[in-house]
Each structure stands twice: as structure tokens, then as C-alpha cells.
Amino acid sequence: MLIQNPILRGFNPDASIIRVGDDYYIATSTFEWFPGVLIHHSKDLVHWQPLTRPLDRVSQLDLRGVPSSGGVWAPSLSFDNGVFYLCFTNVVGRKGVYKDLHNYVVTASSIHGPWSDPVYLNSSGFDHFLFHDPDGSKWLFNMQWDFRKNKNRFAGIIMQEYSPSEGKLVGPVKLVTKGTSLGVTEGPMVYKKGDFYYLLVAEGGTGINHAATLMRSRSIGGPYEADPESPVLTTVGFPHHPLQKSGHGSLVETQNGEWYMAHICSRVLPDGSNLTPLGRETSIQKVRWTEDGWLRLESGDRLPQLQVQAPALPPHPFPAEPQRDHFDEEQLGIHWNTLRVPAEQSWLTLRERPGFLRLYGRESLYSWSRQSLVARRIQSFECEVETCVEFEPEAFTQMAGLILYYDESDHFYLHISYDEERGKHLAVVINDQGRYDESGAYVDIQDWERCYLKASIRYEKLQFYYSADGADWRPIGQELYMGVLADEYTGKLSFTGAFVGVCAQDLRGTMLHADFDYFDYRVESDRA
């Protein structure tokens, strides 16, 4: 078998991979989306399925008011003596020179949970990794943030002992490395192999200079020497490679002694823009240890491969996921996410009208607090999404429909609304770098009980459609540019990726509801 990269498509960055028995798990970042952290499962490293969302209640994760691209950064998953550990950062402020963030660990005896309430760790930086030393001690590693003038913001990797019995960090804080000349040293992962402790770090930043660098020491506290042939993995110097931004690695050893590295990557639009609306994804590379104890990609160079030899394990595919969600369960499926707040019955329900998702309109798409928005990752450059909505607005302040969303500043919204001139109508709202606009196309749907909405994505091109019966589709508005929904658009420093879903607003505060009958996500092509 071959592993086809990326293995976790769409916004799934900062992979932390572990093996427990015959099962492999990867935890990825979720930022401002709730529930926090997404864990995928595999038995062969080829086939993966989303499994669980460990941070599923406000007592574990309070995201209300966190900025876009704040929230959960770089979780790390580990396992020791029958207990799963998950470290994560909640970034509550990220503008300017400061980073307001808080770091926690939660535990569970089963990967499915329930996961504990969080234990606070520190606030000195981000990208935390809890290493369980064979001698029984536990050590927390994280990058250190330095906001001072003329200082390196990425001030190196620090470590401190963690005491499970006391539920806190104890003893002195020690700087173990300042990184290499690549700079922007973060994402520490620690492993013990033979006589060495290995420190795998991300360097170069999460953009086109991203890389994975390996260091080692005979002592847990260092000093750590860098691999003289660093980095292990990068696409620097190869701007046309299909897996850009490769770095931030995490290692796993199979039952048969084979080694693999999960890592961040991004696929760019083919229009020459170098924009990545699918966000940062996860790939896997096969690696090998050299005779002198360093790590190399099996391919023989530093470039990630689209196809990788799978480990010698029995194939374990999962059932194909249905393209249509009929909303006939009592809870949302695992692909669905809400913005900052849990899916509570006060604003989202699958029970009041069985077979429908009912959303009660709340705050605007600019809100960091009480949005009524449900969305899933866009995972392919070629796909179609479709829904059917019943909504009876009475004012221009009431809206509901289909949204393609990056953040409050950049999104496209095909919605139903009402105004005194047009009555009940369809329109397309465009937010580009925070500038509100309307496409200029308005469709009268005054007598329609229900309205079918569709978005067709073909690489950089997005076209909205509407229908009265779900069969006769007509375009609305001009073709839109998907690059607007990319991390790098206009140089913004953001970290998520494009989502698609449904939402409702009621800026009068009366919480008018909209009913969505189903939601289709159809992949037309999944070429890397």
C-alpha cells in the first residue's frame, strides 16, 4: 500500500501523532472553532477517520471573545501507564508584541473520554509537549515568547518538571536550546531512543520557510546539538513543490520498528498566487535512522513526498462517509464546528423539528461572542456544497443561508433576507479584508416556502447557485475568488483555512429561526 498525502485534508495543522498498541492517533489544532482539538484514528497510517473532540465543554475551553486565529494552538498528545495526556494552549490575545495565552493539560483513561477538566501549566509561550521519561519523571517543553525590544520573539525552547500528584509544574525552568540559524524555533517534540534524547522542533515560521529540525542530547536537560545536515524536512527553495510549508514534525514508531513523521503542509492554488484556502494540512513521511543516529527521509532528500510506502500492517479502511447529512440525529456529526461557543439547545437544535437543523439567529458575522454558525472544513479544491433552508425574515436585520467563511473579515454569504423595497429576497454578501459589499444581484423569492442553495468550488473559482425545487439551478452574482479565504491573503498572519456551512443572524435580538433540511458536501476531485 501507499500513503497518499495529505492524509488529513483541509485545515488540520500541528499534527501530534502517537501509537497505543495497534492504534494510531493524531491530534490537530482547532483555533477559534468549537469543540476544541480534533483527534483522528488509523490502524495502518493509510486510512484515517475523525474520531473524537476532547475539549467539548466550556469548563475545559472557554473561547468566547478570543480573536480569530486565536484559541487552541498546537495540542500535543501522549500516553503513559494507561493514561492519555493532551496539552493545549488557549490564545486569548495575539495582536502586537504580546501573547496573552494560557496552557493546560487534560487527561483520560480512554481516547474517547471523558476528558478531565484542565490543569493549568503556564503562560510563558506556546506549543507544549509533555515528555514521559522512562525513569518515571515528566517534563514539559514549550517555546518561550519574548516581547522586549531588540529581543528574539521566539526565545528558545524551555523545560520544567511536571508533578502529576501536585497537578502543577515544579522546580526550575531551564532553557535547553535557542534553535538554529533558521530561527522561529517552536513546536518541540521529545523522544528517547538508545542513549539519546531527541528534540524535534519546527523552524522558519509556518509560511514558505517552514522546516523540521532534529537535535539530540545524552541528557534530558541538554545541551542539545543540531543535526549537522538540518533540516530533516522542508520545501524551501522549491516553490513549485505540491506540498508547500512543510515542517512542524511529530514522530511515531510502528509495531514493526518502522518510523514515520507526521507534519504540516499546504497545497497552493494553481493560479500562481501561492494562496492556500484549504489551510495547513497533515501529511506523513517515512523516515529512517542513520548509523550515526540521525533521522533522514526515506526518499533520500528533504522534500516531502505525495506518495509514501505504507508500513507493513494489515490494511484497515473505514466505511465511506455519506455526502449528505440529513440532520436526523440528535447531535451534530463530528465534521461540524461552531464558532467559539458550544452547540447548545438555546440557539441550535436537531430536536424541535426532527430531520432539520434549526438555528436561532443571534449576533453578526463580525461577532467574537454569540454567532449562530455551523460549518465544516473545505478539504478539496473541487467540490460542491448544497443545502435547503426555510426562513421567513421580517426585516433586513434578519438573515440566514449558506456561508464560505475564513473569519469575520473574509467570507462569502448567500443568504435570504427582507427589506422594504425588495421584500423577501436572495443576495450575496462579500467581505474582503473587512470591507462589506453586495454582489448587486437580488432574486425575489417572496412566495417561496423553501429555497435551495449551492456553492460550486473549482480551485480559485467560486460560484453560488439557487433553486426553487433543487433541480433547476441558476447562478446568482459574479464568480468569486477563493484566494480571499486563504491564510496568506493580502499578507495577513492567520492560521486556519476555509470553512463552509450554514448560519443565521437576527440583529433585532428576537432570535428568529431558520430551518435547514440537509447539507451536502460532494468532492468532485481530490487531486493533490
Image (spheres, rainbow, N blue to C red):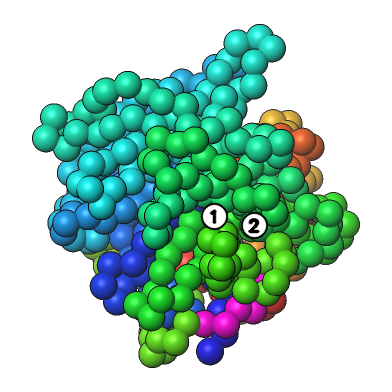
> Image height check: is 468 above or below 437?
below
- Residue at the image point whose x is 38% and y is 90% from the top: 314
| Mark 2 and mark 1 residues within 8 Å of each other at the beta carbon | yes
Specify whether 160 is left or right of 387. Answer: left
Report the amino acid beneath label 2.
Val
Q: Which stretch appears magenta?
A: 305-310
Please say whether residue 35 is visible from this viewpoint.
no
Residue count near mark 2 (Cα–Cα under 10 Å), binned few <14, some 14–19, many ≥20: many
Work out whether residue 241 or residue 475 is closer to the camera in this orientation and state it.
241
453 is within the stretch colored magenta: no
| Left or right of 148 on screen, residue 345 | left
Residue 444 image position (x, y, % from top left): 66, 54
Q: Residue at left 66%, top 58%?
A: 233
Q: Is residue 498 above or below residue 385?
A: above
Q: What type is the residue that disc 1 sits on?
A: Gly
Examine the rendering and report whether any part of residue 82 can be seen.
yes
In depth, the one of 455 and 8 nearer the eye is 8
Q: Name the element at disc 1.
A: strand
The label on residue 179 is none
Kindly indicate the quadrant of the structure image that contains residue 334: bottom left
Left/right of residue 483 with respect to residue 247 in the rendered view: right
Q: Which mark is residue 232?
A: 2
Q: Of discs 2 and 1, which sits in the foreground?
A: 2
Give the structural element (helix, strand or loop) at label 2. Answer: loop
**Residue beneath label 1, please?**
249
Frontmost residue, 369 versus 492: 492
User: Which quadrant of the structure image shows residue 469?
Assistant: bottom right
